[in-house]
Amino acid sequence: MNASLEQLADLLAQGKASSVELCQDYLDRIERHNPRLNAFITVDRERTLAEAADADARRAAGQAGRLTGVPIAHKDIFCAEGWPTTCGSRMLANFVSPYDAHVISQFKAAGMPCLGKTNMDEFAMGSSNETSWFGPVKNPWDARAVPGGSSGGAAAAVAARLCPAATGTDTGGSIRQPAALTGITGLKPTYGVVSRYGMIAFASSLDQGGPMAPSAADCALLMNVMAGFDARDSTSLERAPEDYARDLAQPLKGLRIGLPREFFGEGMAPDVAQAIQAALAEYRRLGAETVEVSLPNMDLSVPVYYVLAPAEASSNLSRYDGVRYGYRAAEYRDLLDMYEKTRADGFGAEVKRRIMIGTYVLSHGYYDAYYIQAQKIRRLIAQDFVEAFKACDVIMGPTAPTTAFDLGAKVADPVQMYLSDIYTIAVNLAGLPGMSIPCGFGADSRPIGLQIIGDYFAEARMLNVAHQYQLATGWHTMLPEGL
Amino acid sequence: MQWETVIGLEVHTQLTTRSKIFSGASTEFGAAPNTQACAVDLALPGVLPVLNKGAVERAIRFGLAIGARLNRVNVFARKNYFYPDLPKGYQISQFELPIVEAGELPIQVGEGDKAVTKVIRITRAHLEEDAGKSLHEDFHGEDGKPLSGIDLNRAGTPLLEIVSEPDMRSAKEAVAYARALHTLVTWIGICDGNMQEGSFRVDANVSVRPKGSDKFGTRREIKNLNSFRFLEQAIEYEARWQIERIEDGHEIVQATVLFDPDTGETRMMRTKEEAHDYRYFPDPDLLPVKLDEPWIEQVRAALPELPQQKQARYQRDYGLSAYDAVTLTASREMADYFEATLAAAGVPAKLAANWVMGDLAAALNKEGLAIGQDRIPPARLAGLLKRVDDSTLSSKLAKEVFAAMWAGEGEADAIIEAKGLRQMSDTGEIERIVDEVLAAHPKSVEEFRAGKDKAFNALVGQVMKATRGKANPQQVNELLKKKLAG
C-alpha cells in the first residue's frame, strides 16, 4: 500500500493487477478507515469501479497511457460530472455537477479512475479542515490533531494511503500546509499553469490547483496530467507542454538555496526549526549551498491576503443565492428574505466572516484604503521575490510554524488560525510555485514540512530538488500507525 | 422664469456578435426560455468567462467612428448586486478604464433650411454583459400563488453602453442625438438597431435650470426607453414635472424613474439613498484587454464612409442642404440608394435627392417597406430622373410614370412609350391645337379681351385637356399670349 505511482503503473502494465482490483483495494481501505478520518465526503464504489473497468478496457485495447488505471481522489472543489460537488458547504450539499472541471477531464483522459471526493474547509476557507459542513477531518498521525486545510481531506487520505494520490487547491497554503501537517508531498504550481475552469472559485487571483502525493516523483507524474493551457480559463498561460519529471535525476551540486531572514525569526516552533535545519544540512551534504536572502515585506502578506482574498470571495460567492441550484431556505416571505435565510443557513461562520470582510473592504469609501493599498503591497511582495531569486535558485523555509495543532485549538481565534499560513501566503500573492515535503517529526511526533519556493515556472527544478532529498531520506515513506 | 432642460443619454446597444460576450451560447433573439444559457451563463460553480473578441472589435469600430480615444489597455470590473436574473450576483462591466473615451457625434438641430449642426460629446462607451429577464406573469405554484420565472437567454449578451455628456437642451435634441447614434451603430454594423427586441435602449438623465444659469440642476434618470417617441414624451413630461415642482417650492431629489407609455408619466423607482453600493473591482477572472495598433488599423481600414462624412460631402460636393444630407444618410441603405441613383442618372443631385426623399420614401412608407426592399432599383429610378431632367416629362407625368414603375410596369422609357406620356415639345403641333381651341371658344377669347384674366386660365386648361396633359404648360402660356395679342 506504500506503492508509488510508478510502481502502480508498472503493476498495471505488467498485468499483475487490474485497475478494478486496485480500486477495490483502495475502496476497501476507505471503507475501513474513513469513518474515523472523515477524509472523504463522497465515495461511490459503483461509479469508481465503472471508471476502473473502462481503464482496464482501454489497456486491453492497447490504448493505455502511463497512468491509465491508477486511481486518484479529487478535492471536492473540482466539479466532476455526475458526482456531488459540495465544496465542503451546506450550500452545495445537494449539487451534482453537470460538467467536468478541466483538471477532472485531464485525469479522465489519462484514464485515472476517481476514488471519491475529499473533504475540505468550506469553500477552501480554513487552515484546519474544521469549517467543513461535513465535519472535521482527523490527522492520520494523531486523531486529536487537525490535518491542516483547506485540502485536509486530500492530505489525510494520501497520508493514510486511502488513495495513491489526490488533487488539491492552494489559495494561501491549502496544499502545502496540510501536506506538511500530514507528512506528504504537495505542490502549488505557478499561477496559470493549472486551469481553474471547473474549480470552484474562492479567490480567483490566488487559487491554483496542484498535486498531493507521497513523493515528488509522484507529483511530477501528476503535473504531467493536470498542467497545461486551457482556453476556458483566461488566466491560463499558453506555454509549450513540458515533462515535469525530466530533471528529477539531476544532481544538486551547485544549487543555491535562499534562506529568507524573515522565515527564520520568531514564530517558528523550536522542533520545527530543528527539523528544517537538519533538512538544510542534508541539502548541503547533497552539494547545495545556502545563502541568506530577504523578503522585507513578508510580514505584510497575511494582512494583505486577508483583504484581497475575502474581497474576491465576497463576489465569487454571490452566485450562491438559492435561485438556480444548491441550498434554498425552506420558508421565506419574499425575495430578500429568501436571500438572507438561504445565505445565513447555507454558509458556515468562517465563510460568512470572510464575505463580510470582503464586502467591507470593497465598499464605497473603503476601497482605496484597503483593496487598492493591498494590491500595491502585493506588487511589493512579488518584487521582493524577484530580488531574492537574483541570489538563489530556490528558497527554503518552514511550511508551517508548528506541527499539526489540536482539533478545536484555534477555532475561537481566527487570527491565530490565519497565522498558521504565515509562510505560505506570500507565495500565492506573488503567483510563484511552492512545495512542501516531509522532513521530520516534532516533539509531539506529528509531521513537519519543508517548504521549497521556486521562481516562476521552476516546477521541474523544484521537483528535482525535492526528489533528490527524498532519494537521500525516508521521511516521505513513513506511515502512521494503525493503517 | 424661463427654464432650460439639460439632457444626457446613456444608450445600451446590443452588439451583433453571434455568441455571448463571455460564453459560446447563441445570442439569437426569441428562443424558448433558458435554451440559450450554457453553464457559464447559468453561473454554475467553477465556470469562468472568456472574452469574445468580436465584441471588442465592435467597440473599436464605434470608437473610431466617433473619433474617440481607444484605451490601449482597458479593464473589466465586477458590478456587484443581487437580483434573480443576474446569475453571478455581479455584472461584468467596465468601470475605471472603459474601452472608448471622449468621442463626439454631430447632430442636426431644427428642420429644413433652418437646421444647424450641433456636436454632442460622448463621454465614454464601455463593454458589458446583459442580465437575464424576470418574468412575472403566467407562473403559479401548486398553491396557486403567483411565482416569478427567470429566462437567462439574454444573460451574457454583449452590450456597448454609450454615455453622452449632458449636451442636449430639449427633448427634440435628445431624439436627434438618439437617432444619429442609432444610424451610426447600425451603419457600422455593430448593432441591429431593433428597438422592439431591446437592441437599442435609452436611459435619459434629465434636469432643469433657469435659463442662463451655468450650474446643473439635480437630475432624475428615466430608465429603459425603447422608442424615440417615448423618449421625447418622457423627457417632455419629466422636464415639465420638474419645473412645476421647483415652482411649487420643492427641491428635486436625485432618483431613478420609469416612464409609463400608457399614462405618459414618469414615476419614481428609487432615490439615490436607496441606490446600491456596487463595490466595483477589477474582475480577477479576466486579464486587462490590450488593443494593439495593427488590430486598430485593420478595423479602421474596414470601416465604411460614415454618415457624418457623407453629410459633409453631400453638402460640399452636391450643394445639398444640411437637412437633405442628414435625411439621405438616415441609413446606409438610403445613402447607398441615393448615390447609386445619382451615379446612374447623371442629373443634378437636388433632383435625385428630392425623388429619393419624396416620392420613393412616401411609397415605401405607405407599404411599411424599408429602402432596399423596394420595387424600384436605383437604375430604374435613374431612368425616370433622366426624363424629368431633359423635360420629356412634366412633374405631373413623372409621378404617373413613377406609380407605374412602382406597380412593376418596367423601365421609365418603356412606360412613357406604352402610355404615350411623352411631354409635347413640338411647337407646330401645340400651335395647331392652340388655334383649334381659340376657334372653338370665341366666348372666352372675347372675355379675355374684355379684361377678364380668368378666361385666360380657362383657355390654358382647354389646351392642356386637348393634349391630355402632355403639353408643356409654359409653352402653352407663351403661345396663347402671343396669339391673343396678335
Image (cartoon, coloured by chain):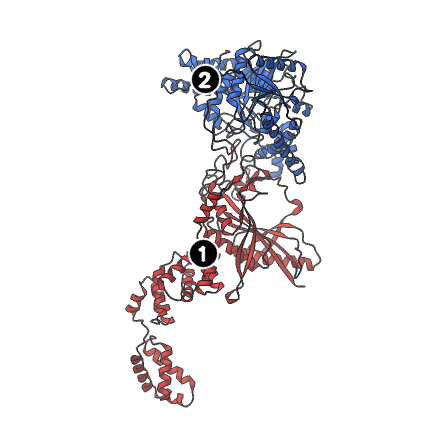
Chain colours: A blue, B red
Q: Residue furthest right?
A: B249
Residue B11 image offset from top left, x and y in percent: 54, 50
Considering depth in this image, is B287 or B398 the residue closer to the camera? B287
**Dot 1: element:** loop
Marking on residue B177: none
Check the residue under mark 2 and report the chain it is in. Answer: A
Residue at (49% x, 46% y) in the render: B60
Q: Position of residue B55 (x, y in %)?
A: 48, 43
Question: Residue A170, can we see it?
Answer: yes
Work out whether B289 lies above or below B241. Answer: above
Separation of marks 2 and 1 at Cα, in angstroms: 65 Å
Question: What is the crowding at mark 2: few (fewer than 14 residues within 10 Å), some, or many (at least 20)?
Answer: many
Residue A232 vertical placement versus A189 (above, below): below
| Count of numbered circles in the view | 2
Q: Position of residue A168 (x, y in %)?
A: 54, 23
> Label 1 neighbourhood size at 10 Å, few (<14), some (14-19), many (20+)?
many
Task: Kindly identify the amino acid type of the residue bearing the numbered disc 1.
Answer: Ser
Residue A120 in view here: no
Q: Is residue A298 left or right of residue B322?
A: right
Q: Tell me, yes or no, whether the two marked residues, 2 and 1, touch with CB atoms within 8 Å.
A: no
**Quadrant, the N terminus of chain B:** bottom right
The relative height of residue A473 versus residue B486 in the rendered view (above or below) is above
Give the label on residue B331, or none: 1
Task: Using the rendered view, name the quadrant where residue B4 is placed.
Answer: bottom right
Q: What is the chain identity of the residue bearing mark 1?
A: B
| Amino acid type of the residue that numbered disc 2 sits on in the rendered structure | Val
Look at mark 2 in the image and give the residue it sits on.
A70
